[in-house]
Amino acid sequence: AGRIFVMIARGDYFQCGYVVAKGAFAAIRSRGLDALRDSIAKIVPPFADRVTALAAWDDGKLLTVTVDRLKHWSRPGLICIGDAAHAMSPVGGGGIKKANQDAVAAANILAAPLAEKRLTFADLKAVQRRRDLPTRLTQSLQIFIQRRVIGPTLAGARPMAAPWPVKALDRFAVLRRLSARVVGLGFRRESVSTPDVHGGVG
């Protein structure tokens, strides 16, 4: 099977992720920690002398990736946003961005009704109406990348390669700018518009 190892520089350390197919962790663990260290050393030889820092299985955490969403984000007296409403893949860093945007949209929609003590269930449902489409679009993009790039690589069907939409980004500058905006700002940008305690605009 193919292997994907991700490293992110965090200043004085690297955050690392070893991507495996869903359900494969039990087999990896059964082969032992030494086998895992050897596998990492083969993927990133310049760091082969550091794999001993992985001293126990508890030094890492298993993150099971799920992409799903609630059919209804709210009930009378309750609203779910962020991960509580929709589980996002780590692909593209969409989770924290979507949680922040949900929070801004919720504040913009609910602040005045709450302050004026006239909040209704319809106000809660309005938050989902605002944020549902951007969530669906982001998850669809993440699933596309999972199925077309990550999945076949982990299955050993082919080396990791960019699908044609990604190759098009390399060819056309306007598409690169558009993709950067989607990744950085999401499909629907949210700006704070709630009045602050002094009567201005936050």
Image (cartoon, rainbow, N blue to C red):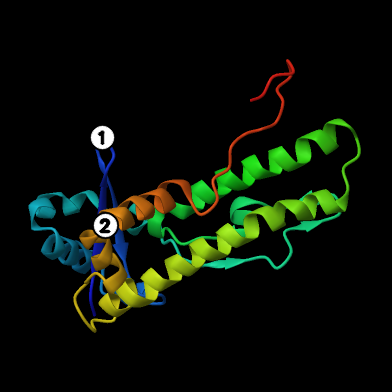
| 140 lies left or right of 193 | left
Q: Residue at x 70, y 68 (%)?
A: 71
Q: Residues within 10 Å of mark 1 (few under 14, many from 20)?
A: few
Splitting the image into 4 quarters, where does residue 11 fall? Answer: top left
Q: Amino acid at mark 1?
A: Gly
| 40 lies left or right of 195 | left
Per the model, the C-alpha gap separating discs 2 and 1 is 16 Å
Q: Amino acid at mark 2?
A: Val
Q: Residue at x 34, y 76 (%)?
A: 148
Identify residue for label 1.
11
- In the image, residue 140 lies at what x, y percent? 49, 69
- In the image, residue 38 lies at what x, y percent? 15, 65
Return the residue nearer the eye: 50 or 86. 86
| 97 lies left or right of 22 | right
Splitting the image into 4 quarters, where does residue 163 fall? Answer: bottom left
Identify residue for label 2.
6
Q: Does the residue at mark 2 contact the one at mark 1 (Cβ under 8 Å)?
A: no
Tally of numbered discs? 2
Return the residue nearer the eye: 197 or 57. 197
Q: Earlier in the sequence, mark 2 or mark 1?
A: 2
- Under circle 2, the secondary element is strand
| 140 lies left or right of 107 | left
Q: Is residue 30 visible?
A: no
- In the image, residue 153 lies at what x, y percent? 26, 76
Q: Residue at x 34, y 52 (%)?
A: 59
Image quarter hosting the C terminus: top right
- Under circle 1, the secondary element is loop
- Point out which mark residue 20 bears: none
Q: Is residue 93 visible?
A: yes
- In the image, residue 164 lies at what x, y percent? 27, 73
Residue 182 vs 160, above or below: the answer is: above
